Every structure is written in C-alpha cells, then in structure tokens.
Amino acid sequence: MRKQYLPKDSLPALYEALRKRGYKIIAPHVHDGAIVFSEQHSPDTLPWGWQEETEPGRYQLQHTERDNKSENPARAFAWNNGPQGIKPWLFKPKQEMWRAEETENGLRFRQPDYAAEPIAFIGARACDLAALNLQDKHFIQGHYPDPFYSAQRQQLLLVAVNCQRSASTCFCTSTGDGPEALFGYDLLLDELDEGFLIEAKSEVGDEILVELALELPLELPLDACEQSLLEQAEQQLQQAAQQQRKMPSDSELRLLQNKLDDQRWHEIAEKCLACGNCTLVCPTCFCSKQESNSEKLGEVSLASVQTFHPEQSDNNDVASQVRVWDSCFSEQHSHIAGKNIRPEISQRYRQWLLHKLLMWQEQFGRSGCVGCGRCISWCPVGIDLVEEANLLLRSELDQAVEQATGERP
Ligand code: SF4
Ligand code: SF4
Ligand code: SF4
C-alpha cells in the first residue's frame, strides 16, 4: 500500500479530509494530568511535547520543548498510552439496553437505535489494535454478537501510530503485540522530526492519502530521502522494542493451572484494594452488569407486557435497563445463584490474573494481555501483573531452564 511523507503543517489537511468524509475526530489531548481521547477539531490540541513517566502505581506527564532532551522539536506522539484504549468508544461504559413505557394497553418495550456515528480514532498504538482484535472476538465473533459494539465497529476508521519509545511499564514485545503496528488500521503514522511517514493499509485509507496528495502541493521528499526517513522510523521502533519487563510466553502461562492453591494469592490480597481499576483501564476486559431503573413500574401483570417499536410514541418512559462496566473484583460480580463464589480478595485477584493470562487462551486462542502496562501504572498500590505472573511461575520456569541447559538458574 501507499506510503508518503506528510509534513507537520499538513496535519490539518488530514483532519479536513476525515471531516469531509463525515468522520467525527477522536484524538488524544492532555486533560487533568493524563492523555485522554475525545472529540477534537484541530491537530493543535494533540499532546505536543508531552511524555509520560510510569512505574507501578505511578503515571505522571512531563512536558519537554524538545523531544528526548535532544535538539529535535517537540512531537505529538512521543507518549505511549494513557488510561484509555479504544475500548470506551465501542464497548461503552454505559449503554442503555431497552426502555419500557406504560400505556393504556399495558407495558410497551422499546429497543434503542443501533445506529452509530462515523468515528476516526487518531493515535491507536499496536497494543490497542491487538486489544481491539480480542474485543472483536468477544463482541462480534461469538455466538451472540453485540449489536451496539458491531454497529460502532463498522463505522470506525483507525489512524494508528508506531511507538518511538516505550514507557517503563510497556511489555508488548514479550506478548508479540508491538511496538510496530502491523494490522488492523486504515492509516499509520511514523512521527519524525519535521513530519510523518504516512502509510495506508485499507482501501479507505488509500483514498484519503490520494486526496491528500491531490489537495496538497507537496514536494514529496520520499524519493530523495526515502532511505534516511525509513531508517529514522526503524531506529525509533528498535528503541521502543528495548523493553525490560517480560511476560512469560503463552505456553509458560499455561503452567499457571498448577498454581491454583499457591500461597502468593494471599500475599497479593494483603495489598490489593479490590478497586477494579486494573480491569477498567484494561483494553481487553469485557465484563458488565445490568442495572434496572424500575421504581415507577409497580405491580405489572405479565399479560399486559407487549413488545414496542421505536416508531410508536416514546412518551411516558417509565423504566430502563442499562449495561455498565463491571469487574471481577466487585463482590456482586461473583454473586451467583444466591451465593458469592469468590468472597475473598485473594480469590478475586486469582480470577483476574487467571482469566486474563490462562483461561483466555482456551476462550480466544491467546492470552488476554497485550502488554500495554496500564493495569500496572494505574493500580493505586502498584501491583505488577508481570511481576506476579513471573513470581507465580518462578519454580516452573527455573525447572524449564534447567531441563534445557542442564544448569540450575
Ligand atoms: S492486563 Fe494490563 S497490561 Fe495486559 S492488556 Fe490489560 S491493562 Fe494492558
Ligand atoms: S479478567 Fe475479570 S473483568 Fe476482565 S474479562 Fe475476565 S472476568 Fe471480566
Ligand atoms: S490489583 Fe490494583 S488496581 Fe487491581 S483491584 Fe487490586 S488494587 Fe485495584
């Protein structure tokens, strides 16, 4: 597919091309000390010069006029991630499932409109795209496709960005999900000193790139400097791939099934607050609960319940059913058939780690962790998923090394 050079001052033209095609632009910007995504109208609000410093339990933004303390000008995508991935735009934190209204003839039920708006999401990283792929498996490719997610997914255009450095909490190299974005995007940006290499992967991405080239009197430097630009981008990717944190491989993680009764679960539980932050920031977690707002219904006879069609009156809404994000750390989440099956925090932490790293392999063919590191930096007490997985598997991993090398590690 097409690859071109886009000078920084041509970014507004990219925004304009997206807008002309009807897309609402969702882009990163700095808000309340974090990099978050929301509708933005100009590339001026991108996080120019901002980078995050992370470690377990810590996320702090710092601004540098120059990139990486060098003489390079400030960049828009020198950070890695914030608390959100793409998840909130498809699997929404709050989703109305249906409403009911009281009429003279009894209750009528109304389904919400599944229509979704075209969204262009700018700034997705390789780990976010891998997470999206997993969410697709859950929400679209399962036995019961989710109509809300599916509708918005069809209207999503993705402008991905290759990482040029890695945060200290990143470990996408060890999960095989980054730092290079290889699939799942429409357009891909590699940020350089004065502009971007921009590459199209889909038909619509290619069309946008053609429009840009037509509309812009660009003197594409790609022919002249192609080699040096590509080398710069490759060096950045190599730098981003130098990650210290390493998640065991999927086959090693399968050994976690021998660790159900490990003492370590109780040690983690002494620190863990069961706040659920780790599941909320995780771009692959998909649990939800439903809440009913039904106070006004009172006693209703089943005989009076009818299905309702949206074109009919929507007056007198009396009740609604809403889906909201939930977490396996909440007590109610494990309340099944009148009993809480995971009353202890140690059991709930075990559910989180084992579902994510072990059971997903059976459900979706791979671990549910894409190495973004969000659960590590946004855990208020700094519990580190990678460290815990390695600790739990230490004896098994040592044994494997001994068998392979004949030496005790
Ligand atoms: S488990 Fe943690 S590191 Fe893995 S995908 Fe979720 S938030 Fe990212
Ligand atoms: S880890 Fe917990 S919150 Fe995440 S998908 Fe699994 S059960 Fe749900
Ligand atoms: S591991 Fe951390 S973020 Fe997750 S529930 Fe426990 S304290 Fe909260």
Image (cartoon, grey):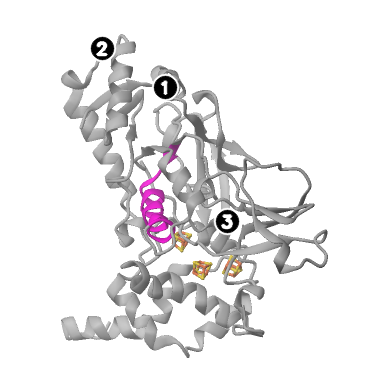
**Where does the image place residue 47, in percent across and percent down from the top left?**
52, 33
Q: Which residue is mark 1?
A: 11
Magenta residue check for 133? yes
Question: What amino acid type is highlighted by mark number 2?
Answer: Glu
For the point 42% across and 86% down, which residue is it?
259
Does the Cβ of the disc 2 residue fall within 8 Å of ligand 1?
Answer: no
Q: Which residue is mark 2?
A: 219
Tell me the SS state at disc 3. Answer: strand
Q: Which residue is mark 3?
A: 58
| Residue at mark 2 to residue at mark 1: CA–CA distance | 15 Å
Magenta stretch bounds:
122-140
* Cβ atoms under marks 1 and 3 closer than 8 Å: no
Is residue 48 visible in the rendered structure shown here? Answer: no
Q: Please say if 223 is above or below 272.
A: above
Q: Please say if 388 is above or below 337.
A: above
> Of discs 2 and 3, which sits in the foreground?
2
